[in-house]
Amino acid sequence: MPEILEQHPGARLCIVGRGHMAKTLRKQAKKLGVDHAVFIQPGMPFEELAQHFRSADLVVYPSYYEGQGLIPLEALASGTPVVTVNQAPLTEMIDETVGELFTTGDSSELAKAVCRSLSDPEARNEQAQRGRARVLSTYTYEHNAEAYEAIYTSLKPQYNAQ
């Protein structure tokens, strides 16, 4: 966050979620001198979370352990680009056409990815439109049901032969 604020002094980080790290994160933000720009919100109903996604310039998802969380898809569906780690399976959903990628654990690279996005509102708007279109064309329940049906249909002759 200090690197981001150097280039974008008006940037704000809103961390959403309940958990055991809130106190530690607040202390770290104060230690780094960025506590004025960091806000921690407790867990909230999906409708409120979706509003946060829609009102954000971008969503940062630096997960070390959640392979394919719903947050990136929910952000894209809300029309918000995503900055996330450059590792599968996240890279199956997120690429440079709908957001930015950085190497896991590299906070400087994360800051650069965020700054690239914040520095180019026009490109960010195009990423947002492409991201929403990607979710609607690929990741809906209807699309997934059709994909599963196609798999089972293709296997059916194989099982009937036995």
Image: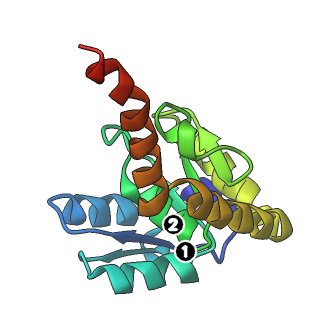
As measured in the structure, the alpha-carbon distance from the residue carrying label 2 to the one carrying label 1 is 5 Å
**Residue 122 seen by the camera:** yes
Q: Position of residue 56 (x, y in %)?
A: 57, 76
**Residue 33 seen by the camera:** no
Residue drawn at (61%, 50%), measured in percent from left and top? 111
Residue lying at the far left of the rendered structure: 20
- In front here: 110 or 5? 110
Q: Is residue 119 above or below residue 159?
A: below
Residue drawn at (63%, 73%), measured in percent from left and top? 57
Residue drawn at (32%, 42%), measured in percent from left and top? 66
Q: Is residue 159 above or below residue 58?
A: above
Left or right of 80, for residue 87: left
Marks 2 and 1 in Cβ contact (< 8 Å): yes
Q: Position of residue 107 (x, y in %)?
A: 52, 42
Q: Mark 1 highlights which residue?
A: 78
The secondary structure type at the circle numbered 1 is loop
Q: Amino acid at mark 2?
A: Ala
Q: Mark 2 highlights which residue?
A: 75
Q: Amino acid at mark 1?
A: Ser
- In front here: 100 or 162? 162
Q: Position of residue 92 (x, y in %)?
A: 55, 38
Instruction: Judge the density around disc 2: few (<14), some (14-19), many (≥20) Cα neighbours within 10 Å.
Output: many
Q: Position of residue 41 (x, y in %)?
A: 31, 78
Marker count (numbered): 2
Residue drawn at (56%, 37%), measured in percent from left and top? 91
The secondary structure type at the circle numbered 2 is helix
